[in-house]
Amino acid sequence: MAQSDAPKPIYPIPTQQHLNWQQLEQYAMICFGMSTFNDLEWGYGDTPLDRFDPVGGDIHAEQWVEVCKKAGMKGVLIVAKHHDGFCLWPSKYTDYSVKNTKWRDGKGDILADIHAACKKYGLKFALYLSPWDRHHSEYGRPDYVTYFHSQIRELMELYPETFEYWFDGANGGDGYYGGANEQRIIENLEQYYNYPQAVKTIKGIAPEALIFGGTCDDIRWIGNEEGWADATNWAMMPGLDDKKGQNVQLTSGYEFGSAWLPGEVDVSIRPGWYYHATEDNKVKTIAQLVDIYYNSVGRNANLLLSFCPDRTGRINAIDSVRAIEWWQTIQNELSNNLLTKATVVASNERGVGFGASRVIDNDHDTYWATKDGASTGTLTFSFQSSQKINRLMLQEYIKLGQRVAEFEVQALSADGLFVPVGINENTTTIGYKRILRFNTVDTKQLRIVFKRAKGPLCISNVEAFLAPNVMVEPTIQRNENNLVTLTANDRECEIYYTIDGSTPRVGKNKYTQSFTFAKKGIVKAISYDKNFKKQSIVSEQEFDIPMNKFAVIGTESKKLFDGNPSSADYFGEEGVTIDMGAQHTIKGITYLPEQNRWTSGYIHSYEVYVGDQLDHLTKVAEGEFSNIKNSPNLRTVTFDPIKARYIQFRATRIVDNQKKSNIGEFTVITK
């Protein structure tokens, strides 16, 4: 059929660069630098260069890229300079770089190594350059902007085939700043950093590159660093003059937006972005990574999964094995498209060239389309024999814009009626790709009912699968009364556990109800599916001294000890003071912010005081929880062991200048 007979575009529409980017679907970020050797998330900018000293003497960038390739990544984005100002390439504009370290006698270049490895393994290359620089003496002044733009040009001339250029959103705060040791705040980002000129430089050298962040971006940050986009996710956002759309969430986009800004989900495989040995047992599980995939790529967003090589200059074996197994799991779940042997009919077809069969022809450049004025319709897939299905993939032909706003998936029941399948999320948008999970249905017909769209339907691909069960390890929680509860993701799963540090075994010590664990120690547990004879990996939770005798001065609430991170206690500028009921030798604390999506009151900067008398407490620690708003994960503060009965945890700075800070969970670390 002639191209002129195709539906008219519904604007905005993606550029060819956007289409190329979206088809990558997932790629990796590498976070490695001075913070790796400092055991920090955000370096202060004052670390001596001799600290950059990999164990074993070398950095194995090719291993990073090889792991990324085996984990299904289509590209690698390297953090060339993080907020501490240290540069992973021998920049001619600063001495604070690899060229003045002991590594390879100052002749090393991590960017060049990664770039060469990307070419070898067929992965695309991308760059991250932090606008904020806690090392540079002129940060916050005009001379730094000249330096910043010089480095942008330097990097682009070195790597003109960059597919994405990443500007971080962290801008200004406490820093070394050449020895000034002060706070510098940037009020007007676009004016100070001159982002329009930066875009001209990048696009002038690398016209295929898309820009993330800054104030002139092509891709939008999804609004969190936890690994999810909303089930409703439009690729559009409001224009600058669109007052009605200014309050939309980054996680969901805006149906009536005038700018094509698809979302990117950035998340680390660990709690933090840089390597910390204390997080070796906190690498995301296969089940968690599977959820991230379905909540990002499966919700019309691209996934940027971050890896943090350790001090040996390698991606840790725990991380690499987990990532590769995760990708194998995804491939296994989505490998056998059941619709290749189905027949499909549509309630409405535009004509020759736009028939229903286009959605199963394995050609993403063809699509089923409805007639003008028909923004609803159905696709019905029929099988020769009954099929079990629990996954569905849908794709729109987004070259003509994103259209679908509401749909429903139905299966033919034994009674001859079409009934909705059990999907636990809104079936609203589709976009480039939507992948749905639901309880297994056994049916001879599957139907998709498109209830609302912004114009004629344009569906390019539909696939269905039967995915095997993914065993999820149990969650382990202890409340303020020392009762431990174990929970499996599937009510039919059995749970087996140990409390002596040994590995749980199927058939031994089955969990039936909550139990008391009033001591310091480790609880381990596994889930077991007796129908499929499959067990999960081992989950473990280390508990410190019991907190049933702890009391919070001034309140009877104990939500910060209840084992439920979704509940929290809030405190003013005085912070929280805890009576432990007796003297203990303590050497640290842990802080977990409230784990609800739209909470506030994250503690950015803190002080810790301890003592035996309320009126005579001694400060034992102070610092910051870097990036706490976007990564509200567990934070640990350590100090020299000290005997005390009382401990005070005080926020000296709260994110977004809130009046009260939240504490979801708080524990002490004893010697």
Image (cartoon, rainbow, N blue to C red):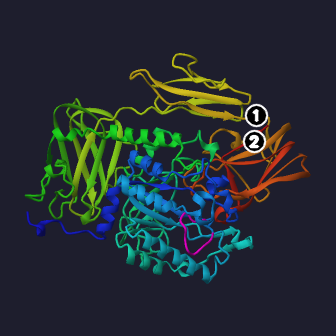
* In the foreground, 639 or 237: 639
Q: Residue at x 44, y 46 (%)?
A: 67
* In the foreground, 402 or 138: 138
Q: Position of residue 541 (x, y in %)?
A: 63, 34
Amino acid tagged 1 = Ile
Residue positioned 16% across, 35% down in the render: 383
Image quarter hosting the C terminus: top right
Report the residue marked by disc 2: 668
Query: Image quadrant for the N terminus?
Result: bottom left
Relative image position of residue 564 (x, y in whole percent): 62, 40
Q: Which residue sits furthest bottom?
A: 142
Q: Are marks 1 and 2 in contact (CB under 8 Å)?
A: yes
Magenta-colored stretch includes residue 84: no
- Residue 222 seen anywhere in this rendered image of the structure: no
| SS majority, magenta | loop
**Mark 1: which secondary structure?**
loop
Residue that badge 1 annotates? 545
* Magenta-drawn segment: 86-95
The image shows residue 330, relative to residue 301, as above or below, that is above
Left or right of 213 on screen, residue 382: left
Label whose residue precedes the other's in the sequence (1 or 2): 1
How many numbered markers are drawn? Answer: 2
- C-alpha gap between disc 1 and disc 2: 8 Å
Quarter of the view holding residue 653: bottom right
As drawn, the label of residue 577 is none
Q: Residues within 10 Å of mark 2 (few under 14, many from 20)?
A: many
